[in-house]
């Protein structure tokens, strides 16, 4: 499969960034809730970070923030979970994708063009298949319970969502 859009060309120079430090899984979940409340139909969030960094914990919060009160777990083996929230959520895990040619098999086109919201763990496995409007989240492990969480907005919709997140967190701080 070939990329639909080149997307790295705009580069982070024009992108907006928000950096947060959380001190517990609960704090990460709350941050996720604020992000969930900031997303709109068609929103796409790519998550990067090592195993155990907290991608799924953040997604649990996002799902809550979008009105889903069910169980959220890493779709590592099934690759895609669907949650019935304010708008449908597609929770994707690309950990097992060895080659972007496999994206066609998992129905990635539907994920990419979803009218719901797509939350994609290990988005860095398919860097040339990220939509131009999106938020990228990079989580770094800074201590046993400390996590550095960086949000970068791409495109007008991504920037608008990040702006809502910033407002929800108050004062431009995180
Ligand atoms: N500040 C934090 N934020 C998120 N998770 C944390 C934090 N501190 C410790 N943890 C732990 O790190 C692990 C994160 O797991 P998970 O979200 O499944 O990671 P991933 O999806 O990135 O592989 C959980 O066991 C969680 O309890
Ligand atoms: Mg996970």
Image (spheres, grey):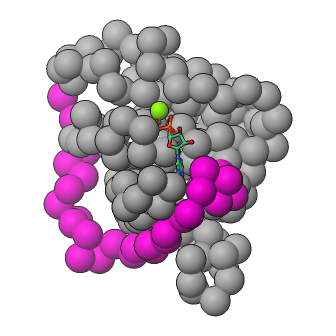
Instruction: Give the vertical position of 165 relative to 58 (above or below).
Output: below
Counting labels gives: 0
Image quarter in which the N terminus is found:
top left
Residue at figure coordinates x 25%, y 34% from the top left: 125
- Residue 79, how many percent across, how many down? 45, 18
Residue farthest along the bottom direction in this orientation:
171
The residue closer to the viewer here, 145 or 51, is 145
- Residue 136, how many percent across, how many down? 39, 55
- Residue 7, how many percent across, how many down? 24, 52
Image quarter in which the C terminus is found:
bottom right
The residue closer to the viewer here, 93 or 130, is 93
Instruction: Give the vertical position of 173 relative to 34 (above or below).
Output: below
| Quadrant position of residue 102 | top left
Q: Is residue 170 magenta?
A: no
Residue at figure coordinates x 65%, y 40% from the top left: 60
Question: From where the camera sits, is residue 1 visible?
Answer: no
Q: Is residue 19 magenta?
A: yes
Residue farthest along the front direction in this orientation:
144
Instruction: Give the vertical position of 113 relative to 159 (above or below).
Output: above
Question: What span is colored magenta in the figure?
Answer: 1-30
Instruction: Give the vertical position of 70 relative to 67 (above or below).
Output: above
| Quadrant position of residue 141 | bottom left
Q: Is 116 left or right of 92, judged from the image as shown?
A: right
Question: From where the camera sits, is residue 2 visible?
Answer: yes
The residue closer to the viewer here, 112 or 22, is 22
Residue at figure coordinates x 51%, y 55% from the top left: 145
- Residue 154, how many percent across, how many down? 38, 63
């Amino acid at each position: 499969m070939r990329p639909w859009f080149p997307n790295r060309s705009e580069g982070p120079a024009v992108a907006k960034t928000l950096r947060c430090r959380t001190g517990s899984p609960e704090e990460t979940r709350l941050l996720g809730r604020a992000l969930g409340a900031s997303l709109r139909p068609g929103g796409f969030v790519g998550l990067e970070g090592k195993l155990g960094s907290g991608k799924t914990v953040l997604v649990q919060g996002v799902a809550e923030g979008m009105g889903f009160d069910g169980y959220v777990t890493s779709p590592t083996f099934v690759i895609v979970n669907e949650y019935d929230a304010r708008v449908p959520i597609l929770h994707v895990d690309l950990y097992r994708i060895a080659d972007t040619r496999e994206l066609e098999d998992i129905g990635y086109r539907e994920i990419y063009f979803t009218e719901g919201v797509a939350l994609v763990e290990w988005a860095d496995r398919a860097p040339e298949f990220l939509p131009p409007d999106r938020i990228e989240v990079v989580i770094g492990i800074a201590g046993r319970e400390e996590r550095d969480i960086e949000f970068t907005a791409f495109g007008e919709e991504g920037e608008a969502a990040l702006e809502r997140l910033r407002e929800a967190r108050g004062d431009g701080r995180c």
